[in-house]
Image (cartoon, rainbow, N blue to C red):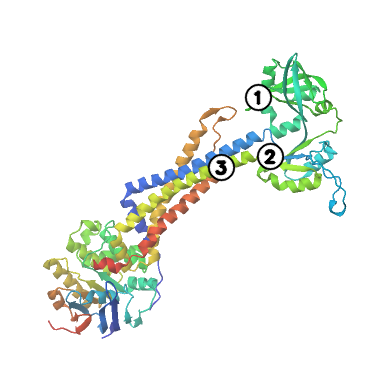
Amino acid sequence: MKIIPKIKHNVDLEIAFTHILAKKKQTVIVSFAAAIGIAAFIFLNSLVLGFNRDSDEALFKSTPHIRIYVEDKISEPLLNDMANNNIAVISNPKIVNENKKLLNPNKILSEIKQIEDVTTATTWLNINVFYNNGSAQVNGSSSGVNINEANDMFDIQSSMVEGNLQNLISTPNGIILGVGIAENLSIKINDNISVVSPTGIVKVMKVVGLFKTSNSVVDKSKSYMNLSIAQQLMAEGPDYITDIYVNVKDPDKAASYLPMIIERTRYNAEDWKAANKSAEASKKTRGIMMGSISIIILIVAAFTIYNIVNMTVKQKLHDIAILKAQGFAGKSVVKIFISEAMIIGILATIMGLFIGAALVKALSKVYIGGDRGYFPIEFEPKIMIMGILIGLLVTFIAGFIPARSAAKVDPISIFRN
Amino acid sequence: MKSILKTENITKFFYIPVEFKAINNITFDVNEGEFVSIIGKSGCGKSTLLYILSTMDTEYIGKIYLDGKLLTGLKQDKLAKLRNNSIGFVFQFHYLLPEFSCLKNIMIPALKLGRYSRDEIEYQAYEKLKLLELEEQALKPASKLSGGQQQRIAIARALINEPKIIMCDEPTGNLDSKNTAIILDIFKQISKDLNQTIITVTHDKDFAKASDRVIEMQDGEIINYNLIM
C-alpha cells in the first residue's frame, strides 16, 4: 500500500466543541457549579493560610523562633554504681537549685549571630517583679532587654501607644509599662514608680512609654527595662543572662537549627513550635477541617462534570457507534469526551479563580476589630495555582471515566437494534 | 476480474442466551466493482456475516482477506484505520450526527483520514453532494432533512474516502419506492463508473434483482452463490 502523507485535522476536538456548543446553557450551568467548588477550595484554603500566618505573627510578637536557656537539672544519686557495693545511698530527686545563668553570654551571642540565616539574636533576662505606686501594688514580669535588638525581634514599637522606645536608652532607669499596669496604678507617662524584685531590691523607675497588645493579661503585667537594671534587681553582675532569643529567616525551619546551636553553645535550645504545641495542634486541626471540607466540595463539583459527560455519552451512543464504524479508534472517542470535560473544567477553573478571588477580596474588607483589624486573608498565588491544578485534575478524572465507557461501546450492538 | 474480498471458512458462534452457530463455514469471493446482494430470511445470519466482513466483529473463526491482505487477528486500532481508509458504511438508519451540517457529516471521515487538506475535502464533499443531487442541503443541519435525503447524505459520507468496498445493511429498509430507486441508481453508477465494490444485505427482492449477483443464505450457510431471480 502506498504511504500517504497524513494531514492532521483535529476532528476529535472539533466534535467535542460542537457537542459543547450544542448545549451552551447546560455547559454554563455545570461550569458554574464546578466553579463554585474550585472557588470554595481557593477561598477556604486562603482563609486558613491567612489566619495561620496572622496567628504566627501574633505569636512572634512575644515568642522568639528559638530560645537558648539553661535546663533545670534533677539531682542525681550520690553514688551511681550501687550494684557493685552494698552502701545504700538515699537519693531525693528534685530540681537542683542551680544558677540559671548562661556562662559567657556575649561569646555565645556573637557565635549565634555568625550562623547563616540568623536574622536577629539578643540576650534576655526575665524577672518577676512588683510594681508599686504608693500603697497600690501590681505583680507582673519584666524583661531586661537591649531595646533595639528586642524591637528588631518583636516589633515592640508597633504596640507603643505613648512615649518612645529610644527614651529607654537615654533613661537608664526607665521602664516601659503595659497600659493595664498604668491604669491600675493610675500612672501617667514620665511618672515614677517603684519596682520590687524577688530578691527584695527596690528601684525607683521612670515610666518612659506605654504599650498596648491584643492580650489584656499581658498589658496588666508586662514591662520592659534595660538589661543592666534587671541585673541589678536580681543582685547579679553585668554578665547575668538567662536566655538568648534567636530569630531565623524561615521560622518553619527553626527546629533544624537546634542541633547545631546545642552543639555550639552546650546549652539547651527550644524552637517555637515545641514551646507552643497547642498552637501547632490547633493550626493542624484548622488545616484538616478546611482541607476536608474543600475536598468534599470539589468532589461534588467533579460529580456535576462527570454527570454531564456521562449523560452525553449515553445520549450519543448512535454517534459513537457510527464514528467507530467510520474508523475512529477507541482513543479518539476517549479524546472527544475528555476534551468535552476539559472544556467545561477550564471554563469552571477560570470562573472559580474569579469567584474565589472575589470572595477573598470581600472578606479582606471585613473589619473584625481587636489588634487584627481586617480579616487576615490575602491573595495566595500558591493556593490559586493549586486550585487550578486540582480543578483540572479532578475534571480530567471526571471526564475519563465516562470517556472510557464511551470507547468501549460496541457498534454492532447499536446497529443491530 | 480481481478479487477484492475473500473469506475462508468463516464460522461464528453466539453464546447468549445459549450456544448457537450463527455462521457455518462460509467461503466466498467478491470481485472488484461487483454489486452483490445477500438475501435470506430473518435470522439466517446475513447481518452477522456483514458485521464480520466489516471488521467490527472480530470474534469469529476463519480468515478474511481484503485486497489480498489478511485482516483476521489485526488489532482494533489498526482495523479502525483500515475501515476509515477502505470501507464505507450505509445502514438502515442514517446515523448522521445531528449537531453537524450535512457537509460536515460527509467531511468527518475524510478529516479523520487526513489524506487531503480541509479545502480539498470540502470540495470533494460538495462533489459527492452533487452526485447525489443534494448540494442545496449542504449547510443545513442533518436533522432538518427528509428520510430519503438523510440516507443519501449517509451514502455520500460512505463514499467520501473513496473506499474499496461499501457495505450496506438494509439501506432501503426505511425508504419509499421512489427513494429506493434513486439509491439503487446511485449504487449501480458507483460500481460501474468508479469500480467500487458494494456488498449489501437486503430484504428487498426488487433491490436484490437489480444487483450484479445475489447470494442467498439459510441457517448460517450460503445455499446459493449466484441466485438467478
Q: Which label's residue is closer to the chain start, 1 or 2?
A: 1
Q: Which label's residue is closer to the chain start, 3 or 1?
A: 1
Could you tell me residue A313's position as x and y percent? 33, 58
User: Of tags 1 and 2, which is closer to the observer?
Assistant: 2
Could you tell me residue B223's position as x and y percent? 19, 84
Q: Is residue A359 above or below residue B204?
A: above
Q: Is residue A399 above or below residue A39?
A: below
In the rendered image, the quadrant that contains the N terminus of chain A is: bottom left
> Disc 3 residue type?
Thr
Q: Which label's residue is closer to the chain start, 3 or 2?
A: 2
* Residue drawn at 17 percent across, 72 percent down: B184
* Residue drawn at 39 percent across, 44 percent down: A32
Between A141 and A227, which is closer to the camera in this rendering?
A: A141
Q: Is residue A195 above or below residue B183?
A: above
Residue indicated by mark 1: A212
In the image, farthest residue toward the top = A134
Per the image, label 1 sits on a secondary structure element best described as: loop
Q: Are marks 1 and 2 in contact (CB under 8 Å)?
A: no
Quadrant assignment, res A281: top right
Label 1: chain letter: A
In the rendered image, the quadrant that contains the C terminus of chain A is: bottom left
Determine if residue A339 is in view: yes
Could you tell me residue B63's position as x and y percent? 33, 82
Q: Is residue B73 above or below residue A201?
A: below
Label 3: chain letter: A
Q: Distance between the Cα atoms at labels 3 and 2?
A: 18 Å
Residue indicated by mark 2: A275
> Disc 1 residue type?
Lys
Between A192 and A110, which is closer to the camera in this rendering?
A: A192
